[in-house]
Image: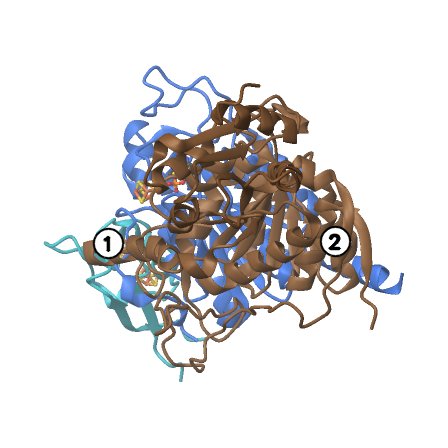
Amino acid sequence: MAVTDYLRERFFPHMWCPGCGHGTVLNSLLRAIEELGLNKNNIVMTSGIGCSARISGYVDFHSLHTIHGRALAFATGVKLSKPGLKLLVPMGDGDALAIGGNHFIHAARRNIDITAIIMNNRIYGMTGGQFSPLSGPGKKATTAPYLTIDREFDIVELAKAAGATFVARSTTYHAKESIEFLKKAIDHKGFSVVEILSQCPTHYGRKNKEGDAPQMLENYRNNTAKIGSKALADDPSLIARGIFVDVERPEYCQEYDQIIERAMKE
Amino acid sequence: MAKARLKEQKIIRDWCKGCGICIAFCPKKVLELDAEDKAVTVRPEDCICCRLCELRCPDLAIEVFKQEEE
Amino acid sequence: MTKQIMFLQGNEACVEGALYAGVEFFAGYPITPSTEIAEQLSGRLPERGGKFIQMEDEIASMCAIIGASLTGKKVMTATSGPGFSLKQEAIGYACMAEIPCVIANVQRGGPSTGNPTHVSQGDINQARWGTHGDHNIIALTASNHQDVFSITVDAFNMAETYRTPVILLLDEAVGHLREKLILPEKGELPIVDRLRTSVPKGVDYHPYLPREDGRLPMSDFGGDHRYNVTGLFHDMWGFPSNNPKVVNELLRHLVDKIDNNIRAITRYKEHYMEGAEYILLSYGSSARSAIHLAQNRRAKGEKIGVLELQSIWPFPSELVREKCAGAKAVLVVEMNMGQVMAQVKMAVDEPGKIFLANRIDGKLITPSDIKQLLRVIQGRGV
Ligand SMILES: Cc1ncc(C[n+]2csc(CCOP(=O)(O)OP(=O)(O)O)c2C)c(N)n1
Ligand code: SF4
Ligand code: SF4
Ligand code: SF4
């Protein structure tokens, strides 16, 4: 199948701004799915609210566009109810970790077989450039005219601590790497998290003088390094990319099947 | 092994938003923006079919077709 | 065949009703006085291959049942005051996306934490107006365990019939009271199953295109039809739309699909209503006291009757107007500041003869509380 077979082409060109990284995440995700050869009828994409969340309207899967921050809770219901389905949950950083932070850590804790994709642009894109829990201190945002003082989450550390059994990070510059991580995450049995740094040239880029989309991608190239690389060892201030966790642990729906077995015996 | 050669680079004009990503990161400078700010293939003969433009395009506007190998 | 007779709590009667109706999925978060529903279903659902999940909060619980409903399951959650508040955004989503689900709200005192273990009927208005935007909702209630059982079955049936969330407004007193339930046999009460589309694979399916009878056939997630579900204004495929015509039709549909079926949805009971000069209009546990008083007074020759509402929303205005037309006075007996009374006043021709007999102190309203007010209205002193 061609990538376009997974698209709802009638809605193209899509609504994202020129150079928005969210389109590249969509691109990578579809290639990962194509390479895995998944059946469209078997995939449910659940998303919340945000520029990022609009991704679910563009894919030709079962698509559930919900409310801000709660996509993982909806996905949990779908998955537990019908464990045979593949659940993909792309989220913005605000969607996933501000309003949706509680659902994120609990989905990870349960190790329910869902793939969470965090399209991290370090800003609230849809509402016009307010800071997010991923902006970090010293950033400009429409709600931080004197610069932010809030510290940011480290999504990888948070996901690890909460119990996710697959955790990876890449960027939209590293499209091939993103595809590889997404494939592994989707294939992984358990709660998998892929953080993809995704540029918002319109708000974050402009406010923080990071330039246009190609310049922001260049920053992703220059400011990140693979875990285990010499570059990272030499300069630990770089953002680490790679697969940080890939372990097997009992999966929630499978565990629940055992509850059913026990309940039926008694 | 013969090196890969481009057969066709399909660019969906309606979808391209002229962000310049494909142009900035093409290792062989195959692409340029035209007067309407749409990406166009200007040096097809230099293309090494790495597909990076296709994979990075945020608008899914590019497809790279390699020539069949002999 | 001898029928199975149980002695149980109202919350448990609700569980029995839900199982009878075919509930397959429950998500919830503990909160007094509703918790027994979750506790019971955590054991009863897996016994029959169903699923129970304790979520991280009530918001997540509401979202999870919506997700599960889309896979074709009959779903339910249960909560009380503060949890009901948390669910509102997702209830609105289920209204907008037209997803069948049942929400039991075992009412307790409020606002805020109020009193978890004391009775109240203060969430009548929240059930109707708790969400933002225009839509309609169905809310049902009952005063005894037999009725809790059958109204729960009705709730599931209506959720499927109208593709809507249905709210079960129980209260602490009924929820925790222990009394008898005669379990109806299979087939005794009608069950409405999920209406699935007959559109074959490969043919365009419209999740939001009503059939001639107004019903909207569904297609399970994981099935042959891949469509979109969103809380945005949407077209008949479920895709976002800002087309004024589409938006206008959608919102009218959300209101009309329930308003136009108010007769089919209305549930009520009459007690001692023949020639009643004074009507006690009540519902839920307050109706028990009203019925008790009417029974007592009838025995003494006083013409007092009870109109017991079992469906609060959509409010059965016409029924109330008709039934109350001949009465000298109507006492609305409830445990709030007159939430149903306000509806009754709007419904009747002579609002001046509508009075409120209420209690809001966490104690169950008693027959003598009602009688005191009745005597004042009758000009017979206290
Ligand atoms: C309950 C609720 N609160 C607030 C909003 C407004 N809102 C919409 S999107 C959004 C943030 C989007 O940021 P993010 O999740 O990071 O995604 P992005 O748009 O950057 O892709 C907010 C605050 C909402 N829709 N619902
Ligand atoms: S505002 Fe930012 S996140 Fe939203 S579409 Fe534009 S570039 Fe993308
Ligand atoms: S990356 Fe895509 S959208 Fe951007 S200029 Fe190139 S073809 Fe156009
Ligand atoms: S395939 Fe590679 S070389 Fe060819 S145009 Fe694209 S980026 Fe340039």
Reading the image, the residue beneath label 1 is C248
Q: Is residue C198 left or right of residue C333?
A: left
Secondary structure of residue under mark 2: loop
Reading the image, the residue beneath label 2 is A248
- In the image, residue C265 lies at what x, y percent? 47, 57
For disc 2, the chain is A
Q: Nearer the viewer, mark 2 or mark 1?
A: 1
- Label 1 amino acid? Asn
The outermost residue toward the bottom is B70
State which chain is coloured blue.
Answer: A
- In the image, residue C176 lies at what x, y percent? 73, 39
Is residue A241 in sight in this rendering? no
Q: Is residue C37 left or right of residue A178?
A: right
The vertical placement of C41 against A70, above or below, is: below
**Residue C286 image-quadrant placement:** top right
State which chain is coloured cyan.
Answer: B
* Nearest the eye: B46 or C16: C16
Could you confirm whether marks 2 and 1 are on the same chain? no
Q: How many marks?
A: 2
The outermost residue toward the right is A266
User: Residue at image x 23%, y 57%?
Assistant: B16
Which quadrant does the N terminus of chain C fall into? bottom right
Mark 1 residue crowding within 10 angstroms, few (<14) / some (14–19) / many (20+): few
Mark 2 residue crowding within 10 angstroms, few (<14) / some (14–19) / many (20+): few
User: Residue at image x 62%, y 64%?
Assistant: A82
* Nearest the eye: C76 or A10: C76
Please tell me in which quarter of the rendered image ligand 4 is found. bottom left
